[in-house]
Image (cartoon, rainbow, N blue to C red):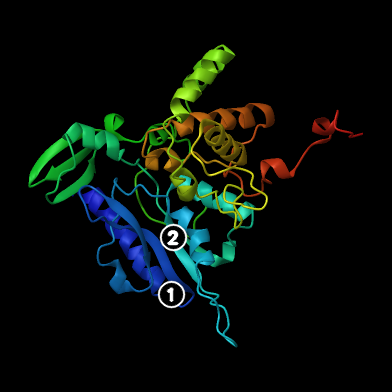
Amino acid sequence: MSADSRDVERGVLDAMRRALGREDVKAVIGWRRGSFGLRTRPLLAYDAAQLSDAVYNPLCAANPATYLPLEQKERPPLRRGEAPDARKTAVVLRGCESRSLMVQLQEHVVAREAVHVIGVPCRGVVDHHMLSLKLGGEPRGPWAIEWRNDDLVLTLDGRERVLPSNEVLLSECRECPHPVPLVYDELVDSPARNPARLDYDAVRRIEAMPPKQRFEFWQQQLSRCIRCHACRNVCPQCSCPDCILERLNPVWIRRENVPRETWLYHFTRAYHLTGRCTYCGECERVCPVGIPLLLLYKKLQKDAAELFGFEAGVKMEDEPLFSCATPNELEGFGGG
């Protein structure tokens, strides 16, 4: 790896080790090497020995904020007379991921005093699907990946391959307006991408379609859905302890994979994320059939920005979008 890439990874791993050495921290969430090809996977470590295969590189795609509510929810029940573990969970977060945490804090899903945030300015994350297409499949040999100026360099079996970043980064990374974490307790020294603006051109093209054509577009996209719920399971904002999508009494959404129920599933989730989605892209990244879910959520982001001047996870003092209203918004709803 180049000096800057090596130094950034060392800085992240050192911060994870320091966190585990603190008396007030019980675990740290980051990334580790996967078991196949150019894969990484989430890591939950309780001691330094479990950091042996920890990594930080442009292939670390999973959003660690997703696992904070899960870590709290999956704790074993206390024995009689046993006090709850009040120590913090440390977590490594980049820009969009820190915004996910901010929404969780605003909604009291996670308590600020329960988290130690290791912030890392972000240069972008590789789209694994695009990379596999470029390589003609999933390589099996040893690999390393690093930033070199504005390009990525992938080393496979000792041979280097230069990858222009604009050809292999996730689309949400290329449009990221907040590459530097907005909430953190310590910040690792790392270069960051220049802030960008969300591109709403694709949304406007859909908006400009006649209703019938728009319906046919989404009908074609959602017909591929297999109702695996991966988009919901990976979303850092889908943290409700009693999910409406699984409620059996009453049954709001049936589990059969038919168009009516599939549409209801996706549009219920979309409205649930209005004013909450931070465009981390996890839903679209894990979708096994390639549905452009970010296009749907970006439409609702656009409406929240244009109608209410609201952007999720940017200001800690903001209230959740649907928990507040102004007198002007109450007119016509019985307001004075």
Q: Which residue type carries mark 2?
A: Val
Tell me the element at label 2. Answer: strand
Q: Residue furthest bottom?
A: 81
Q: Quadrant of residue 266?
A: top right
Is residue 80 positioned above or below 152 on the image? below
In the rendered image, which residue does mark 2 sit on? 91
Separation of disc 1 and disc 2 at Cα?
14 Å
Residue ID at (28%, 61%): 54
Of labels 1 and 2, the one closer to you: 2
Q: Residue furthest left?
A: 158
The residue at 55%/75% (across/down) is: 86
Nearest to the observer: residue 277 or residue 70:
70
Residue corresponding to mark 1: 22
Query: Looking at the image, is 202 positioned above or below residue 51?
Result: above
- Front residue of 30 and 261: 261
Q: Residue at x 20, y 32 (%)?
A: 134
- Kindly check if marks 1 and 2 are in contact, taking CB atoms under 8 A apart as contact: no
Most foreground residue, 273 or 306: 273
Q: Position of residue 278 (x, y in %)?
A: 52, 41
Q: Position of residue 101 (x, y in %)?
A: 53, 52
The number of numbered discs placed on residues in the rendered structure image is 2
Residue type, mark 1 in image: Arg
- Residue 31 in percent (x, y) is at 33, 57
Q: Is residue 252 left or right of residue 10?
A: right
Which residue shows up at 59% across the image and 31% down it?
300
Residue 316 visible (yes or no): yes
Furthest residue in direction right, as rendered: 336
Q: Is residue 57 toward the left or the right of residue 2 in the image?
A: right
